[in-house]
Image (tube, grey):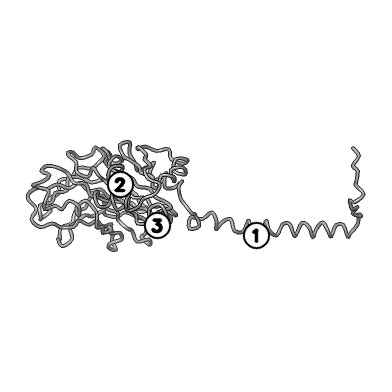
Amino acid sequence: MTHYLSPRTPVIESGSSSSKQRTAFLLVSLVPLLLFLLTLPGQWSLPASKEAWRQSVAYLAEHATLQDGILIHPDWVRYPFQYYFRGPGQTYAAFSTVTASTDLDGPLQGVVGDHPVIWLIQSHLDGPDPDRRVEAWFAARYPLITALYPPGISLKGYAPGYRLDTLPAEATPLDLTFANGMRLAGFQAGSTVAATDDLFHPPSGWLHLTLYWTAGRPIIEAATPYAQLVGPEGIWGLSLDRANDALSLFPPTRWFAEAPGQLIRQDLDINLNPATPPGSYDLIVGLHGAGQQERLSIITVQ
């Protein structure tokens, strides 16, 4: 095929000057590409992530149950959530914007329904809910299970169904009575944990523990439970104190009269020292201000 050049098309002569021009052109073209490629590792790191939707919904897919509810707030961030989520639970999206005059009770009571646990996943709240009114509504009524803070997202679990008639099948039964009359009827905890976590609550790994309490007799003096991870060198993990856990919302001094025979679910997150060496550790539970401690299980730190 014959290629025709227009009269205005310059003809580049062959020779050394032509090669030099081509080389210079390639170098100029490659510099921006190289600068772009050099920035990619930092852009794809977790600290540089704007919103960790993929990791957050993966956590929910593992920890939510078929009976749980998941509230996405504000409602328009449901699009990235739904793109990744393939887990259990009923999802809800109730509000685009929340103000002081917004009716929260009706919609949120409808979300809670009969769900034993509500997972509240939030992002981009500064405009839609600057005072965090939806979160405050849950915190005032239900115990906090756990709180995670991946990049650009807040993920918290609340337990409307924290008063139970029977011990869940997945819990390990116990019969441990403490001096003040609180009886530990069972617990749930994983068997392994990492010492560090760069995603949900850097830099520390957390071990989640669920305790099931009841009143063995009238409890005159309440006490706050704690949990520890203990090795030969001493304490390597300690539960976080939270103002709105189950025992704060429903004090033990009321259990015997108001909830005879019921079990009270309490959730604790044990915060590990990031320098915890790999190995086996005792999971210990006790009451602040009392000398009694009980070993629940052995935990492997990876």
* Residue named by callout 1: 35
- Residue 293 lies, with reference to residue 110, above or below; the image says below
* Residue named by callout 2: 103
- Give the Cα distance between marks 2 and 1: 51 Å
User: Disc 3 marks which amino acid?
Assistant: Thr
Q: At 46% across and 50% down in the image, what residue appears?
A: 52
Element under disc 3: loop
- Give the Cα distance between marks 2 and 3: 41 Å
44 vs 25, left or right, is left
- Give the Cα distance between marks 1 and 3: 32 Å
State the residue in front, 211 or 29. Answer: 29
Residue 295: mark in rendering: none
Q: At 35% across and 37% down in the image, what residue appears?
A: 90
Give the foreground label among 2 and 3: 2
Q: At 55% across and 58% down in the image, what residue appears?
A: 42
First of labels 2, 1 by sequence position: 1
Q: Quadrant of residue 285?
A: bottom left
Element under disc 2: loop
Q: Position of residue 243 (x, y in %)?
A: 24, 58
**Residues tagged 1 and 3 counted as in contact (Cβ below 8 A):** no
User: Disc 1 marks which amino acid?
Assistant: Leu
**Mark count:** 3
Give the foreground label among 1 and 3: 1
